[in-house]
Image (cartoon, rainbow, N blue to C red):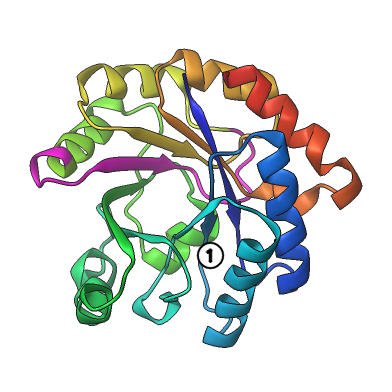
Amino acid sequence: MTEHLTLIDPEKQEPEKAGMIAGIAERAGSRAILVGGSTNPGQDIIDRTILEIKKRSGLKTILFPSSSAMISLHADGIFFMSLLNSKDRRYLIEEQAKGALLIKRSRLQVIPLGYIVVGRGEKVAEVGRAEFIDERDSGRILGYALAAQFFGMKAVYVEKGSGAERPVDSDTVRKVKGELDIPLIVGGGIRTGEQARALSLAGCDYIVTGTLVEQTPIEGLYDALRSIIEAIS
């Protein structure tokens, strides 16, 4: 069974609304809340966002940071990730090294993650200076994914970036997951139950929705999330 993760970008709404979104996500059946985005809104906003999420839901909060400046000790865990197809050492290892000691001394659960941005990649590709990978180039994506596995990372996240017009090609997901022994997370462009189900049937372990959460009015969010979660259950 594929699980659902809700992505909340602290920059896209006030902390109080983020808490409301998390409460709705929990009722809809989401497994955890990812907190992060391509740009840094400031430590105070990040901390307040996580505290509101924890106040209004019982879901675990996992940091999905774009830099070492986006670490909050109020979270439950952190994706300690490397953007594997970045052309910039900053996103491969330098930001990770900057935050490593703080994380070591924290109580955060550390989840080593190989991060791969495919297609245009939207804002995350621009910020992270990701080298272009065609989403249908399953061999190249698989190479990065297996490298992450052999490095000892605990999961691989393949995405097209927030605002993508459609999700990663399901045939590519099927080919990558067919060779991968660690969990595969897929995000970017997932807006319908049909799209989510295709990715679930292709074998991905987790689906992430973020743009859907940002663009759906709060009064319609439960139904929107529930349609995704029912499709993959």
Residue nearer the viewer, 190 or 60: 60
Which residue appears at 81% of the width and 43% of the height?
A: 221
**Residue with the mark numbered 1:** 37
Query: What is the magenta range?
Result: 149-166
Which residue appears at 67% of the width and 21% of the height?
A: 230
Q: Is residue 165 magenta?
A: yes
* Image: 58 above or below 38: above
Which residue appears at 70% of the width and 59% of the height?
A: 56
Q: Position of residue 11 (x, y in %)?
A: 65, 72
Local packing at callout 1 (Cα closer than 10 Å; few below 14, some 14-19, many 20+) is many
* Image: 17 above or below 160: below
Of the residues shown, which amino acid type is indicated by label 1? Gly
Question: Which quarter shows the C terminus?
Answer: top right
* Residue 67, visible in the rendered structure: yes
Count of labels shown?
Answer: 1
* Image: 233 above or below 161: above
Q: Position of residue 181 (x, y in %)?
A: 20, 26
Residue nearer the viewer, 207 or 92: 207
Residue nearer the viewer, 119 or 189: 189
Q: Is residue 95 left or right of residue 165?
A: left
Q: Position of residue 138 (x, y in %)?
A: 30, 26
* Magenta segment, prevailing SS (helix, strand or loop): loop
Judging from the image, what secondary structure is the residue with disc 1 in? loop
Which residue appears at 36% of the width and 48% of the height?
A: 132
Q: Is residue 183 left or right of residue 74?
A: left
Q: Is residue 215 magenta?
A: no
Rendering quarter of residue 137: top left
